[in-house]
Image: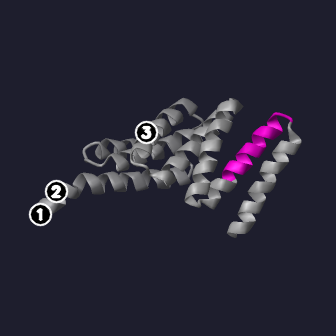
């Protein structure tokens, strides 16, 4: 019985997080935010900074989907600090990529390229081909916005090559 009581916040946070993800995937972002914030609240009761950072990142994703760039960025950067401190490379890469998308959405292409470059380096180090292709594609789109077609083509070709090599 004592184990069940001790694990309650862990299970509760995890369950609420999963419900939030389901709502996010259904496009019901307000419900996703509600459940993701509750998951974050329960995560703070735990002595698990990694899980709390995951909750911040999940909330960042919902805010990004809604177009709330500042809230998304704050959540991703909070998560990123923890992931970097714990050297959780794959999670760091996802945060770098999403922060890049935020800057791109705000038309701040210099900062977007900076974060995409961090994400690309990370994706290559971790062997994450989907993030690698996403980085190349996102960087190519920025170079198209900047009217640099040849540079854009290089990145877009790299995205295609990476997807083909990985079987996606």
| Residue holding disc 2 | 5
Query: To which quarter of the image does residue 130 belong?
Result: bottom right
Specify start and end residues of the magenta stretch as a single range.
134-147
Q: Nearer the viewer, residue 42 or 87?
A: 87
Query: To which quarter of the image does residue 157 belong?
Result: bottom right
Labels 1 & 3 near each other (Cβ < 8 A): no
Q: CA distance from mark 3 to mark 2?
A: 30 Å
Task: Determine whether the residue tagged by mark 1 lies in a helix, strand or loop.
Answer: loop
Please name the residue shown 54% across and 30% down the image.
70
Task: Determine whether the residue tagged by mark 3 lies in a helix, strand or loop.
Answer: helix
Q: Nearer the viewer, residue 53 or 43?
A: 53
Between label 3 and label 2, give the one nearer the viewer. 3
Which residue lies most toward the bottom here? 167
Labels 1 & 2 near each other (Cβ < 8 A): yes
Q: Give residue 140's position: percent from left, percent from top.
A: 77, 45
Q: Judge the density around disc 2: few (<14), some (14-19), many (≥20) Cα neighbours within 10 Å.
A: few
Q: Where is 161 relative to 103, above or below?
A: below
Asked whether 146 falls inside the magenta stretch, the response is yes
| Residue holding disc 3 | 81
**Label ID, residue 1:** 1
Q: Give residue 53's position: percent from left, percent from top.
A: 40, 45
Q: Quadrant of the N terminus?
A: bottom left
Please name the residue shown 69% across and 31% down the image.
110
């Amino acid at each position: 019985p004592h184990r069940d009581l001790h694990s309650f916040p862990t299970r509760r946070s995890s369950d609420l997080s999963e419900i939030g993800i389901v709502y996010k995937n259904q496009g019901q972002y307000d419900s996703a935010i509600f459940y993701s914030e509750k998951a974050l609240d329960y995560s703070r009761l735990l002595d698990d900074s990694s899980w709390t950072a995951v909750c911040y990142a999940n909330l960042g994703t919902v805010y990004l989907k809604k177009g709330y760039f500042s809230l998304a960025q704050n959540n991703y950067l909070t998560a990123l600090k923890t992931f970097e401190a714990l050297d959780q490379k794959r999670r760091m890469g996802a945060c770098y990529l999403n922060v890049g998308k935020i800057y791109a959405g705000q038309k701040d292409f210099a900062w977007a390229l900076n974060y995409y470059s961090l994400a690309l380096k990370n994706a290559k180090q971790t062997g994450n081909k989907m993030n690698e292709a996403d980085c190349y594609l996102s960087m190519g789109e920025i170079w198209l916005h900047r009217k640099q077609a040849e540079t854009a083509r290089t990145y877009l070709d790299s995205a295609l090559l990476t997807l083909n090599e990985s079987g996606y």
